Amino acid sequence: MDLGKLIQERIRDIPDYPKAGVVFKDITPLLADHIAFAGVVDTIVNHHGRGTIDKIVGIEARGFILAAPVAYHFGAGFVPVRKKGKLPAATHGQTYDLEYGTETIEIHSDALEQGDRVLIVDDVLATGGTAQAAAELVRRGGGDVVGLSVLLELSFLHGRDKLGNLDVHSLVTV
């Protein structure tokens, strides 16, 4: 089975969403296909190796869907990074630019322990702003970012360039 081809077949383009000129990558068909979904989770876990990660950070909202089963398979904790104002306890926040505006994300201040080995998981790497902000939040919380795994990398937006020497693992690059 060619997982890369299967992933590409299960992601559909939605033009002009959420605003004109943006082509949204809809992963819901992939999530509905148990073979594709399991293949994505297994590939991320196999890339990094069991026993190497303490916490998985999932970025709201579609990153949660991928990150939670990855955390389960690693035997690691799951830590949500959410949009500003969505977490109930004390938080660290980071504002960043994305391809169609600005956003602020937050993590609970007590979500990580000093030296936690953290893998960030998200659905798409576009301009790199969200991933860069999440990595900064992990570092501020005392964690060591061991890498970023994404389902899809939009290479034409050069997001990887913003991430310095961060280990970026993309299942599919377009």
Image (cartoon, rainbow, N blue to C red):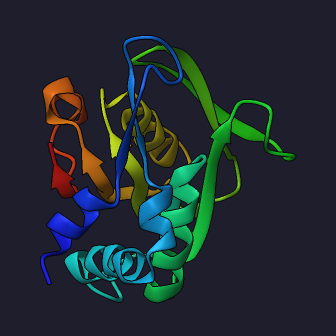
Q: Nearer the viewer, residue 68 or 171?
A: 171
The percent position of residue 109, horizontal first and vertical second, equals 69, 47
Q: Residue at horizontal 21%, vertical 76%? A: 47
Quadrant (top left/top right/bottom left/bottom right) for the N terminus: bottom left
The percent position of residue 56, horizontal first and vertical second, equals 49, 66
Q: Residue at horizontal 23%, vertical 31%? A: 159
Answer with left or right where residue 115 lies relative to residue 163.
right
Q: Is residue 117 visible?
A: no
Q: Residue at horizontal 85%, vertical 47%? A: 89
Answer with left or right where residue 42 lies relative to residue 5.
right
Q: Is residue 39 above or below residue 95?
A: below
Q: Quadrant of residue 167?
A: bottom left
Q: What is the residue that sits farthest to the right in this orientation?
A: 88
Q: Nearer the viewer, residue 10 or 45?
A: 10
The percent position of residue 66, horizontal first and vertical second, equals 48, 65
Q: Is residue 5 above or below residue 58?
A: below
- The number of callouts visible is 0
Q: Is residue 152 visible?
A: yes
Answer with left or right where residue 115 lies relative to residue 46.
right
Q: Is residue 87 above or below residue 96?
A: below
Q: Nearer the viewer, residue 49 or 5?
A: 5
Q: Nearer the viewer, residue 22 or 123?
A: 22
The percent position of residue 28, horizontal first and vertical second, equals 50, 57
Q: Residue at horizontal 51%, vertical 58%? A: 57
Q: Is residue 21 above or below residue 139?
A: above
